[in-house]
Image: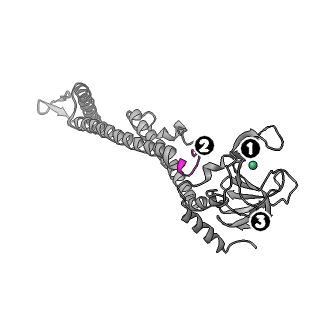
Amino acid sequence: MAKKEYKFNPQTLTYEVIAAPFQVRFYRLLRKILIGFILVSIVNFVFSYFFYTPKMYKINRDNSELILKYDLLQDKINAASQKIKEIKQRDIQVYRPLFAADTLQLSGIYTEYPNKKYAAFAGDHFEPVMQAAWKDLDAMTRLIYLESRSMDELQLLSQDKEKMALSVPAIWPIDKRKLRGSIGAFGGRNHPILGRYIAHKGIDLGAATGTPVYATGNATVIVDKNGGSGYGKQILLDHGFGYVTRYAHLSKVLVVPGQQVKRGKVIGEVGSTGRSTGPHLHYEVMYMGNNVDPINYFRRDMDEQEFERIIASAKETTYEAD
Ligand SMILES: [Zn+2]
């Protein structure tokens, strides 16, 4: 209570209250409000320091729930990441080798994004939880992208697969029933004419002069040298997919360079031209520039009927360049 001011009135012989001026009264009121406010604030501050308000209780509970939910989310992300990694593993070990495709390399696919991408979480109380989840999701997204690129590539290769199956050398270059004597094997041997040990880059198939020689896979004729070298008259066929075949010591060459030939097409006739002791076909298979054993490229499961069917269908072929 503010002190009241009195004044003696000689007429009434009493003390009368002097009303304070308005400004002073206003000031006093303001002071009261201010003091009251400060007091309430102090009490509130002290109270809330030791006790939670109902609102804070709620916020706290919400936060705990949020962390729990983030943990569950992280578990789900980990499980999904694991699945993607398994798919990637299967892709590398099973699907890509089916098409002889190397492991797909995309630069930066395993590089984490710079930290500034996650700047929005910086200083946040839950930064570690949030950032880990985002980083894992980003890594997963990059792996999904890698796998989708790999699938695209394999799809293209699978379209080529049929063409590849028809092109890779896969049949005997002469009719097996017309073979004479034993087969000159691939690898090292004492050369019958040169009289010294040299590598034999193909196999020798003895047969009578004039025996038809077949293209062992769909190909383009790339060379047709008539004599000159030790190979005599020879044909080289480019099958694509890294494969080239050579047919040497021929008596006749029936194709020209640039010509497209189908598997089973008669391309020449057995002879004994070049460095040869008697009529035979010298047959080579090269893969990526290296000579490989042609025996491995004769389809073992092919019976005579199938061989004849291939030869017959080659006769009807319509896509030769000539
Ligand atoms: Zn030979």
Q: Amino acid at mark 3?
A: Gly
* 322 or 300: nearer the viewer: 300
The local crowd at label 1, few if under 14, some if 14 to 19, many if 20 or more residues have their Cα within 10 Å, is some
Q: Which mark is residue 137?
A: none
Q: Is residue 51 above or below residue 141?
A: above
The answer to whether residue 226 is seen in the rendering is yes
Q: Nearer the viewer, mark 1 or mark 3?
A: 1
Write down the residue under mark 2.
Answer: 107
Q: Are marks 2 and 1 in contact (CB under 8 Å)?
A: no
* 287 or 14: nearer the viewer: 287
Q: Is the CB of mark 3 within 8 Å of ligand 1?
A: no
- Residue numbers of the magenta segment: 96-105
Q: Position of residue 93 (x, y in %)?
A: 50, 43
Q: Position of residue 220 (x, y in %)?
A: 72, 63
Q: Amino acid at mark 1?
A: His
**Which element carries disc 1, helix, strand or loop?**
strand
Write down the residue under mark 3.
Answer: 258
Q: Principal SS element in the magenta part?
A: loop
Q: Which mark is residue 200?
A: 1
The answer to whether residue 167 is seen in the rendering is no
Taking 310 as reference, is 181 left or right?
right
Q: Is the CB of mark 1 within 8 Å of ligand 1?
A: yes
Structural distance between the alpha carbons of marks 2 and 3: 39 Å
Residue 70: quadrant of the picture: top left
Taking 218 as reference, is 51 left or right?
left
* 55 or 248: nearer the viewer: 248
